[in-house]
Amino acid sequence: MSADSQRHRCKTDGCDGDDGDSDHPGAVDRVRARGATLMGAVNLAALNLANALGAVGGSAVLAAGLGVLSTAWVGVLLTLIALALFAVTVPRFVPPAAVAAPA
């Protein structure tokens, strides 16, 4: 099977991996091409989640009758939780090794 027909088959049938053909577009290559879009979507989702958590926390303390100033303390608490999560996860992240371009 020629490389062009293999590429066409993968675009129409959806290949999952590399079958030994060096220019075969595997799943990793297809996802890597959309990495910037995926990163933007994840960042926007995190922003929306943080916004929702702030609104829920603020409304909970207001409903409890703790006063308007207590909403600021909820913001401080959520910020400290986010910083702790950041401190725990970032040192564990190891970027993947660079993949050499095919010759």
Image (cartoon, rainbow, N blue to C red):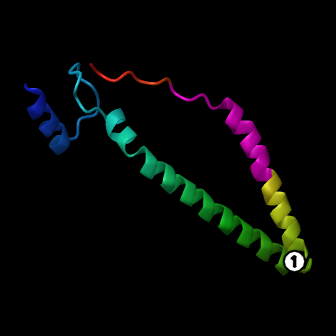
Q: Position of residue 74 (x, y in %)?
A: 84, 66
Q: Residue at x 62, y 61 (%)?
A: 47
Location of residue 78 (image quadrant) = bottom right
Q: Residue at x 88, y 66 (%)?
A: 73
Label 1: state its secondary structure.
Answer: loop
| Nearer to me, 61 or 48 | 48
Pointer 1: residues within 10 angstroms few (<14), some, or many (20+)? few
82 part of magenta stretch: yes
15 shown above or below 50: above
Left or right, 3 with reference to 95: left
| Nearer to me, 94 or 65 | 94
9 shown above or below 79: above
Left or right, 32 with reference to 49: left
Location of residue 21 (image quadrant) = top left
5 shown above or below 52: above
Q: Where is residue 2 in the image (x, y as percent from the top left)?
A: 8, 26
Left or right, 92 with reference to 62: left
Residue type at mark 1 is: Ala
The part of the chain drawn in magenta is: 81-96
| Nearer to me, 53 or 5 | 5
Q: Residue at x 79, y 51 (%)?
A: 81
Q: Position of residue 24 (x, y in %)?
A: 22, 28
Which residue is the site of mark 1?
64
| Nearer to me, 36 or 27 | 36
Q: In which quarter of the image is the N terminus?
A: top left
Q: Main secondary structure of the magenta part?
A: helix
